[in-house]
Amino acid sequence: MSTPGATGLILEEGLLFEQSVPGRIGFSLPAPDVPETDPKTKLSKNILRQKEAALPEISEVDSVRHFVRLSQQNYCKDAGLFPLGSCTMKYNPKTTEAAARISGFANSHPLASPEAMQGNLKLIYELQNYLAEISGMDFVTPWPAAGSHGELTGMLMIRAYHTAKGNPRKKVIIPDSAHGTNPASAAICQYDVVTLPSNKDGILTADAVKAVMDDNVAALMVTNPNTLGIFEENIQEICEIVHKKGGLVYCDGANLNALLGIVKLGEAGIDVLHFNLHKTFSTPHGGGGPGAGPVGVKKKLEPFLPTPLIIKENGTFKVERERPQSIGRVKAYFGNFGMLVRAYAYIREFGPQGLRHISEMAVLNSNYIRKGLEGAYHLPYSKPSLHECVFSDKFQKEKEIKTLDISKRLMDYGFHPFTIYFPLIVHGAMMIEPTESEPKASLDQFIEAMQKIAKECEENPELVKKAPHNTFRSRLDEVKAARELKLRWTV
Amino acid sequence: MRYIPHTNEEIQAMLKSQGKRSIDELFQSIPDSLIQNEPLKLPAAMDEMTLLHHMESLAGENHTLSRSRSCLGGGVYRHYIPSAVGDLIRRSEFLTPYTPYQPEIAQGTLQVMFEFQTMVAEMYGMEVANASLYDGSTALAEAVLMARRIGKNRKTVLIPLAIHPEYRQVVQTILQGFGDHLVETPYAANGGIDRGSLNDYLNEDLAACIIPYPNFFGIVEETRDIIEKVHAAGGLVIFCVQEPLSLGLFESPGAYGADIVCGEGQSLGLSPSFGGPFVGLFASKNEFVRQMPGRLCGMTTDSKGRRGFVLTLSTREQHIRREKATSNICTNQALCATQMTIYLSLLGKQGFKKLAELNWQKAEYAKQKLAAVPGVRLTHPESATFNEFVLTLPRPADTVLSELRKSGFDGGIPLERWYRSLHHCLLVNVTELNSKEDIDALAVELKGALQS
Ligand SMILES: Cc1ncc(COP(=O)(O)O)c(C=O)c1O
């Protein structure tokens, strides 16, 4: 079998600004049909723009070529395997894209009257219920724009919950394997972060939680399955310990793709959980966003849900704009609505059995890769994993080859690399999440490429250290980028 | 299932190679007590045809009026989007990659980011811009957080009541843990900032003063006097721009001396989409770049000396700095930023100016026409506005709006929703999509509605 490889016709393309020719335009301006008053005659010179914005001057043809050429410099999920661990790079259905572009959704204005937007409100209301059912939570707020924004929203609710009881508390416990957004979000809510070490099996133990849990802890933030892809098997006991001291348990739901229809985290004792619709429910990542990060909560947190709330009354949907104990608004308007439409359509196409099948195949694929790479790469934790698996560069280090080198070499074989150097508890982590979208053949190709690289590390280490060789650009100088800081074009 | 390729034979072969007999064995690490035995209570699966039919009928339950007969603005603007924008943005290579953490195979995304940063900086008249935040409201909250970091012990932030009310609410929510240092300042009779209300706060505790530009009433205000005083007190000036097209006509915040500028980019090529996804814009002076939230793309070279782009200054960010990061943001609005970049590449330098002028002219025309309706007056007649303005009606605005809707017009937004005392006031937005004919017809309908 051969791997996809990486050679081809990728064109060089300058910056838009370098192609600018004075007088050129790519826009068809509508003819004025009202009197063409000169702004200078009615507005004070003090307030009129003096120096024009140096936007490029190019034709539509120039623009289209520019963006087509640039696009061709990108690797993307639609081209093949994109096994970034923790990111759940699954196939993004074309149908859900089509759904979001239906004019009735795309052209609906958020400040129109609620009677005029019943379709949107119904969709959001139903999606909230679907997510609640999937996670075992009681209520869901759909407004946060991404996972991290969901964490912030969830932690603000937790703060409001404790404050209502008389004391916001001071600390949040976060395992050392957690994603960086967890401590960063807790910090915005003015909490001190207590870092909790995972044990030698890569999971949290009840004893470790007990040791740091006191009545100044507002919450424990866990990720389950955790960032090693391992299910936190002590989760029920851990939740009990936290609850006993009056704390709450927040779950980062980034890894929900392992659990659809298999586990409802709410039943394990989780109080607050965020979803990443751009992971589990396949809204496209778009080169870094947009996403959506709805948050599910248990009944006791309902009073603190952010505004607005969508209420169903006699078959009509109403918008409740204020609630006495609500944390308030977390974003203008109605969240990243376009992403909610896509996630809704995704859930409706799969249905209950389909969703479970997603998780089953995601876990099957990940374990197939794990098995295929065991021996060639070091597996720091031997406990069974679910939707992703984490290796390290320990074996290759002997030849002074690092995870970074291996990931770069993988590009020459035509694959996007896995997530590197995360979670932080694994030195030289290689975190692999194939998702359910990949057929066996593509997994076999990936395994083959990784096996070949392992061999190259032994036989021809320089080849790996200088990779990639076949890509549009070779290794980029990040030190120079940070030192010489050039963040925009200037003449 | 069309998105999951596995055949039964493949599943069996894959299980076997792992020494497993069933799928259930893959989940053995999960305590039995947590494993679900019942299927999820969700509606049954749908085929594509049925699904799209269902989605269309849901969308059909909205009553979205013709775009040219709508005067809804309030931070979400209807503008014409060229066909090329929709075509390019659908490309898989923009739509389906992740954040460009592997720059060798993501130069397209990175170069667009660099171009986006340049365009935002140019529009705002600022030195440096980031690669996007979620939207205008969260960008403003980030601006306030950044000003508080720079100001160290300075705690007061002045936030005018005439700023977009939902932006103000978001700032209040996100900063609630910081104590009570957000001071809401009233607006003057002309709809602009009430100068007198600021005086008490021009001292060593002032972290920042926010200037909405345009404000929620559509007013574009000259504030050099305020900027001078805030700077003299050692505070920072944050401009918040809810309609960036206005900057084709009005002076850039940078030219006034703004320290941080943030705002919404939706009006530059993104559809209203019920309020999102949009794109938060964020820029500052160079000296503050290490305090910026969000991703930054920088220019560099590869090992063969060729120009290329990478994410840079990531030591500010959560994946490295964790609780000490400048922001918690990870996923941003990259695709929306790309869409805005494509739109602005087409509009260009001249188009940006001409389209802004056209919007202003249309709104000036509509102002005259609508204020001439008996009983109707301009609420802020002396203030400059861009493509949006406030009318005072002889009756509560929401009752007039229901009348107008019957004749097919979305006449605007009733300000009472956020400002109790403005229950007769209507916020009217006019863009290039509203033809003269539509504006004339709206004036006739408004007259009729007020007589009924
Ligand atoms: C485990 C984990 N938590 C949180 C996040 C943050 O989510 P987002 O990027 O949507 O803000 C991510 C994703 O990047 C993640 O992998």
Image: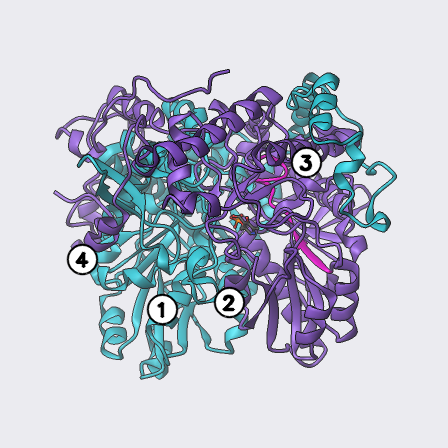
Chain colours: A purple, B cyan
The residue located at (76%, 26%) in the rendering is: B45
Identify the residue under disc 3. Answer: A363
Tell which subunit mark 3 falls on. A
User: Quarter of the image containing the C terminus of chain A?
Assistant: top left
Front-most of A62 and B211? A62
Image: magenta residue range: A271-282
Q: How crowded is mark 4: few (under 14 residues within 10 Å), some or many (20 or more)?
A: few
- A357 relative to B262 in the view: left or right: right
Looking at the image, can residue B193 be seen? no
Q: Position of residue A149 (x, y in %)?
A: 54, 55
By secondary structure, the bulk of the magenta-drawn segment is best described as loop
Q: Are marks 1 and 2 in contact (CB under 8 Å)?
A: no
Front-most of A165 and A101? A165
Q: Residues within 10 Å of mark 1 (few under 14, many from 20)?
A: many
Identify the residue under disc 1. Answer: B147
Q: Position of residue B38 (x, y in %)?
A: 87, 38
Q: Do labels 2 and 3 share a chain?
A: yes
- SS at circle 1: helix
Identify the residue under disc 4. Answer: A46
Q: Are marks 1 and 4 on the same chain?
A: no
Amino acid bearing label 1: Ala
Amino acid bearing label 2: Ile
Decide whether residue A82 is among the magenta residues.
no
